[in-house]
Image (tube, rainbow, N blue to C red):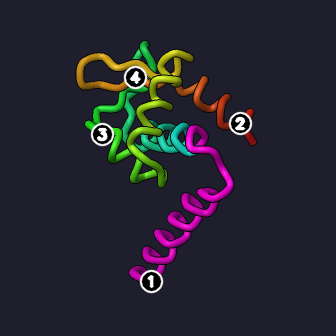
């Protein structure tokens, strides 16, 4: 029973994450994915949520169902808007700005 419950929870999570792919813009999906990664793996710092993960733009593109070029463009846009900042190998996220973008785009 525990195994079935675990599989059901995972399936429900995957369905929730992928249900909006056809109806949302890539920058919206990228912002939501960055927020989820910050929640699951981020470390709160004075500079924002630090993601210790080393994700390539290709890997992010695979997570949100788009191309590497699109992620590169959107990450540049997020950087100019003050939502993300790279320091060495660490990506710092301005979680409040990302949340505002996700909330405003509904």
Left-right relation of 97 to 77: right
**Residue at the (65%, 49%) spot, across then down:** 24
Q: CA distance from mark 2 to mark 3?
A: 25 Å
Mark 4 burial class by Cα count in 10 Å: few <14, some 14-19, many 20+ = many
Q: CA distance from mark 1 to mark 3?
A: 31 Å
- Predominant secondary structure, magenta span: helix
Mark 1 vs mark 3, foreground winner is 3
Would you say residue 95 sits in the magenta stretch?
A: no
Q: CA distance from mark 1 to mark 4?
A: 37 Å
Query: Which residues fall within the magenta stretch?
Result: 1-28
Q: CA distance from mark 1 to mark 2?
A: 34 Å
As displayed, is residue 62 above or below residue 35? below
Mark 2 vs mark 3, foreground winner is 3
Residue at label 4? Answer: 92
The answer to which of marks 4 and 3 sits earlier in the sequence is 3
The answer to which of marks 2 and 4 sits earlier in the sequence is 4
The answer to which of marks 2 and 3 sits earlier in the sequence is 3
**Residue at the (44%, 83%) spot, across then down:** 4
* Residues at marks 2 and 3 touching, judged by CB atoms closer than 8 Å: no
In the rendering, which numbered label is found on residue 103?
Answer: 2
Mark 4 vs mark 3, foreground winner is 3
Residue at label 3? Answer: 55
Q: What is the quadrant of the N terminus in the image?
A: bottom left
**Residue at the (43%, 42%) spot, across then down:** 37
Q: Secondary structure at mark 2?
A: helix
Residue at label 1? Answer: 4
Q: CA distance from mark 4 to mark 3?
A: 13 Å
Q: What is the quadrant of the C terminus in the image?
A: top right
The answer to which of marks 1 and 2 sits earlier in the sequence is 1
As displayed, is residue 2 above or below residue 47? below
């Amino acid at each position: 029973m525990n195994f079935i419950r675990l599989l059901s929870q995972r399936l429900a999570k995957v369905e929730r994450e992928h249900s909006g792919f056809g109806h949302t813009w890539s920058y919206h999906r990228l912002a939501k994915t960055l927020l989820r990664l910050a929640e699951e793996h981020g470390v709160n710092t004075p500079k924002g949520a630090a993601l210790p993960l080393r994700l390539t733009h290709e890997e992010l593109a695979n997570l949100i169902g788009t191309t590497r070029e699109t992620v590169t463009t959107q990450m540049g846009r997020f950087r100019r808007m003050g939502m993300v900042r790279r320091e060495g190998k660490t990506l710092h996220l301005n979680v409040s700005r990302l949340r505002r973008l996700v909330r405003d785009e509904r």
